[in-house]
Image (cartoon, rainbow, N blue to C red):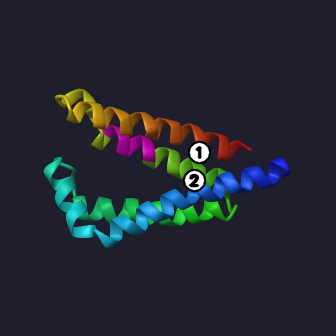
Amino acid sequence: MSIDTIQAIGALLIGGVFVFAGIDHFLKFKAMCDYLASRKFPAPAVMLAAGSALEVVAGLMLALGRAVPFAAGALVLFTLATNVALLRFWESEEPERQVLRSAFLINLAVVGGLLVAGTV
């Protein structure tokens, strides 16, 4: 298998995860809005709609190999922003702290994958 094929599969997988997540957020819009509001997130409906749309569009772009640096960059910024805004493990007590910290670290690994995908 060529390196180009492997990179295309990687971009398809990571982009696909964002497409799936964005669609899932739209399907569970009310519950997601309620969660964001409970976390004191500003303008939860607007932010959720914008973030979910970004996930779907940029995820598709990445998965299909279109404007890859732009798509990866947008997803990096989105992932970092949501990490800091929503996965504030340092403010939580155990066992929630461990769950949030794990999700935070996983998202950092995703950012690393996006950086690689966007520069290859």
Q: Up-down: is 80 above or below 44?
A: above
The one of 15 and 6 positioned closer to us in this rendering: 6
Where residue 101 sits, quadrant-wise, is top left
Question: Mark 1 sits on what residue?
Answer: 114
Looking at the rendered structure, the kind of residue marked 1 is Leu
Q: Up-down: is 23 above or below 99?
A: below
The prevailing secondary structure element of the residues shown in magenta is helix
Q: Residues within 10 Å of mark 2 (few under 14, many from 20)?
A: some
The one of 110 and 37 positioned closer to us in this rendering: 110
Q: Residue 76's x, y, as percent? A: 51, 45
Is 82 magenta? The answer is yes
Q: Give the secondary structure at mark 2.
A: helix
Write the start and end of the magenta stretch as one range.
79-84
**Labels 2, 1: front one:** 2
Question: Mark 2 sits on what residue?
Answer: 14
Looking at the rendered structure, the kind of residue marked 2 is Ile
Is 46 magenta? The answer is no
Q: Give the secondary structure at mark 1.
A: helix
> Cβ–Cβ below 8 Å for labels 2 and 1?
yes
Seen as rendered, the residue at the extreme bottom is: 27
Q: Residues within 10 Å of mark 1 (few under 14, many from 20)?
A: many
Q: Residue 68's x, y, as percent? A: 67, 55
Q: Up-down: is 33 above or below 107?
A: below
Quarter of the image containing the C terminus? top right
7 left or right, relative to 103: right
Label 2 to label 1: alpha-carbon separation: 8 Å
